[in-house]
Amino acid sequence: MNAQRTNGLVKWALLCGAAAIIAAPFVSCSGPVPMGNSNPGSSGAGTGAGTGAGTGGTGPAPGTSIPLTPSTSKTTGTNTGSNLSADGGNCGLTTSNLTKQTADLLLVLDRSGSMDFSLTEDCYCTDAAVTQYGSLCSDTSNCATRWSAVKQALSTTLSSSKDVYWGLKFFPSAGANQNCTENSTMEVPVSPTSATDVESQVDNVVYEYSTPTAAALNAATTYLKTLGDGNQKFILLATDGEPNCGGNPPNSGTDDLTGATTAAAAAYTAGYKVYVIGIGPNLDNLTQLAQNGGTSDFYKVSSPQDLATALSSISKLVGSCNFNSDQPPPDQHNVAVYVNGQKIDQDSSNGWTFGSSSQEIVLTGDYCTQMSSGDQADVQILFGCPGQTYFPTTIY
């Protein structure tokens, strides 16, 4: 069992009878199974097989709880010796693997020419960069470009976001210039090993001169619909200005906020939240775009640290609240979830809910916030056999 992203203990236990977590090499819900001492490593470990007449040590009295003793799980995310008792051993118990669900995060990244501007002003940091589209900043002594901030922040985030599969879509597409061209090709398809390729593409960017945000979001949504990996999917839009390429035919001089917000809403309707990072000083309408994409507001960036913080926050949000078991519960109506020893409600707004199947548990509301913020938290998820009606309000 491993939960390194939360630095806390995470368990998934199959419970047959009263609430319990116990290490055992089998699972049965068909009849009585005598148990010995439930503490791994005890000299009373049972050796019986077949008839259930094991020779283990004396088990706890029915209904007795053995307190959870914190082990190295607080820092490593693993548990090596903490158990609770069963109530009379009326049914076999087992622990099974719990894995945090990986998320697919498609970075839709603006590479318009203004991304070579200063982070804080609409001007260039060096003479060599000056073109007909901009002038040299009056003070270049501490001038950092928007693109250099992206490179720096992505390098840090890509190496640390272990629960995220990244992909990359640039906009505009190569050779677009003023033509607002956007194709359906992903510069880097989403995959478990894509982080290095994303970083390489960003390192070797070629700037173009239009901002077809709507077309890029539509292409991203269409692409994500083709992925059948079972992961939750998200779009991360990073841009330094308001969308253009409106009109018919699309024109780089025509505002297209309406088209971009419509595209963000379509992505959200398809099941893909759109997180928005705004880089630079002119970002007036990105709130509307973020809200249409199912997120409350955009992340405003005016320094390399701001960008690193935004990327880190988003990568935590998309990968921290979904957990998968390697087996379904015997009865999906008899499932109990505990956070820091306290039983929480099955509540889609603030508690827990099933995900795409009964093998997926999703923490919601304040509990998800706690997990995604990096706060230390213990999570236990207990399964009861069919007919199970009692779970304790606390386990410890």
Image (cartoon, rainbow, N blue to C red):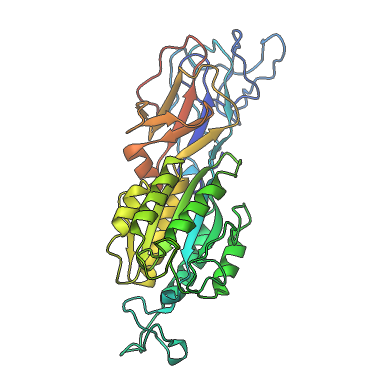
Q: Is residue 318 above or below residue 45?
A: below
Quick check: 299 left or right of 360? Answer: left
Instruction: Name the residue: 41% across, 86% down.
Output: 132
Residue 131 location, x and y as percent?
A: 44, 86
- Asked whether 50 or 163 is in front, the reply is 163
Quadrant location of the N terminus in the rendered image: top right
Closest to the observer: 120 or 344? 120
| For residue 154, above or below residue 34 | below
Q: Could you tell whether 228 is left or right of 392 in the image? A: right
* Viewer-side residue, 72 vs 138: 138
At which x and y percent is residue 11?
Answer: 50, 33
- Image coords of residue 65 (percent x, y): 43, 21
Which residue is located at x 37 percent, y 26 percent? 346
Q: Quadrant of residue 67?
A: top left
Q: Residue furthest front?
A: 248
Q: Residue at x 49, y 58 (%)?
A: 107
- 204 lies above or below 198: below
